[in-house]
Image (spheres, rainbow, N blue to C red):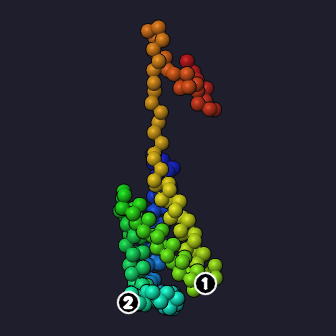
Amino acid sequence: MASPRTITIVALSVALGLFFVFMGTIKLTPRLSRDAYNEMKRAYKSYVRALPMLKKMGVSSILLRKSIGALEVACGIVMTLVPGRPKDVANFLLLLLVLAVLFFHQLVGDPLKRYAHALVFGILLTCRLLIARQPEEQPPEKRILSVNGEEQPLINEAAPEKGKMKVS
């Protein structure tokens, strides 16, 4: 049976992956929701206006929105479907992206209700990354102490587990 740690990581990976695929798709196309798509277009125009440096570098609101949307979709697919280390890389990239989006929201002076979802999903991405990076707990090895030719378990391992009785 899978450990609770594994179940948590898989559940967070799938949920976060699907969320970012959905949000990235909204940034790329109006097919899912025309209203949400138009709102994203408006928001990204305000982000580029607030950062003239982007305009000087040749980054338009369309390029910024589509780049972020494509990165969200790609990382969301990796988080949902790809096993192993690539999930952690996608998780880290999405976390950086969320931090950038939070910066944009603060820059234009959006109220908390406009970016609360980014805070929540940033916290979830951080939790998933921290859980995934912790090593698996290994069962303790049975060590044997030889006393007068007799093998006996070490004292701390000879004690029964809490709540269980040792029967000899």
Residue 62 placement: quadrant: bottom left
> Can you say whether 20 is above or below 37 in the image?
above
Q: Amino acid at mark 2?
A: Gly
Residue that numbered label 2 is attached to: 58
Can residue 111 be seen by looking at this rendering? yes
Q: Helix or strand or loop: what does disc 1 sit on? A: loop
Residue 31 placement: quadrant: bottom left
From the top left corner, tell me how far across and down residue 22 is, in percent.
Answer: 45, 77
- Lateral position of residue 2 relative to residue 74, left or right: right
Foreground pick, 160 / 129: 129
Residue 108 placement: quadrant: bottom right
How much space separates mark 2 and mark 1, taking CA atoms?
A: 25 Å
What quarter of the picture does the C terminus occupy? top right
Residue placed at 51% from the left, 72% from the top?
A: 99
From the top left corner, tell me how far across and down residue 68 is, in percent.
Answer: 42, 79
Residue that numbered label 1 is attached to: 110
Crowd band around label 1 with a 10 angstrom C-alpha radius: few (<14), some (14–19), many (20+): few
From the top left corner, tell me how far across and down residue 86 is, in percent.
Answer: 36, 61
Residue placed at 44% from the left, 65% from the top?
A: 92
Crowd band around label 2 with a 10 angstrom C-alpha radius: few (<14), some (14–19), many (20+): few
Can residue 31 be seen by looking at this rendering? no
Residue placed at 62% from the left, 32% from the top?
A: 162
From the top left corner, tell me how far across and down residue 116 is, in percent.
Answer: 60, 75
Q: Amino acid at mark 1?
A: Asp
Q: Helix or strand or loop: what does disc 2 sit on? A: loop
Looking at the image, is mark 2 or mark 1 earlier in the sequence? 2
Foreground pick, 161 / 107: 107
Residue placed at 48% from the left, 11% from the top?
A: 147
> Can you say whether 30 is above or below 83 in the image?
below
